[in-house]
């Protein structure tokens, strides 16, 4: 909980114009299991989710919520840094 509080405070500090009247933040969790799941997807002939899938979903949430913070959880954080940016 302390980590989420820190993220919330940092987001507020970086985006002061978004908090003139309201103070709520919507957190959206993104779970992207890559490692062993990619192997499984290849075995069953399923397509691996690419960055565009996550970026589109994030845009959808940004359109719905003015103050949204994404919490990305994965066994391959570096992939997200490379593909999804900040």
Image (spheres, rainbow, N blue to C red):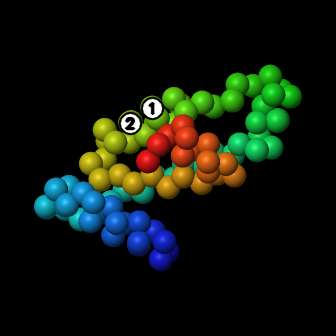
Residue that carries the numbered disc 1 in the rendered image: 56
Residue 62 is situated, as x and y percent measured from the top left of the image, at: 34, 42
Vertically, is 70 above or below 40? below
Residue farthest right in this picture: 43
Q: Is residue 24 left or right of residue 50?
A: left
**Residue at x 54% of width, y 52% of height:** 72
For the residue carrying disc 1, how many other residues have a C-alpha within 10 Å: few (<14), some (14-19), or many (20+)? Answer: few
Residue that carries the numbered disc 2 in the rendered image: 59
Q: Is residue 33 left or right of residue 68?
A: right
Distance (Cα) linking label 2 and label 1: 5 Å
**Quick one: SS at disc 2?**
helix
**Residue at x 16% of width, y 56% of height:** 17
Residue 6 is situated, as x and y percent measured from the top left of the image, at: 41, 72
Vertically, is 66 above or below 50? below
Which quadrant of the figure has residue 40?
top right
**Quick one: SS at disc 1?**
helix
**Residue at x 50% of width, y 40% of height:** 84
Residue farthest left in this picture: 20
Mark 2–mark 1 contact, CB under 8 Å? yes
Residue farthest top in this picture: 45
Vertically, is 27 above or below 86? below
Residue 73 can be seen in this image: yes
Residue 42 is situated, as x and y percent measured from the top left of the image, at: 81, 28
**Residue at x 60% of width, y 30% of height:** 50
Q: How many marks?
A: 2
Q: Is residue 85 left or right of residue 25?
A: right
Q: Nearer the viewer, residue 83 or 24?
A: 83
Residue 68 is situated, as x and y percent measured from the top left of the image, at: 35, 52
């Amino acid at each position: 909980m302390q980590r989420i509080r820190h993220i919330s405070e940092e987001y507020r500090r970086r985006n002061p114009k978004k908090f003139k009247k309201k103070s709520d933040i919507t957190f959206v969790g993104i779970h992207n299991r890559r490692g062993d799941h990619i192997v499984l997807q290849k075995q069953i002939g399923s397509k691996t989710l690419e960055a565009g899938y996550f970026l589109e979903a994030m845009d959808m949430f940004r359109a719905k919520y003015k103050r949204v913070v994404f919490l990305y959880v994965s066994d391959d954080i570096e992939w997200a840094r490379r593909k999804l940016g900040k």
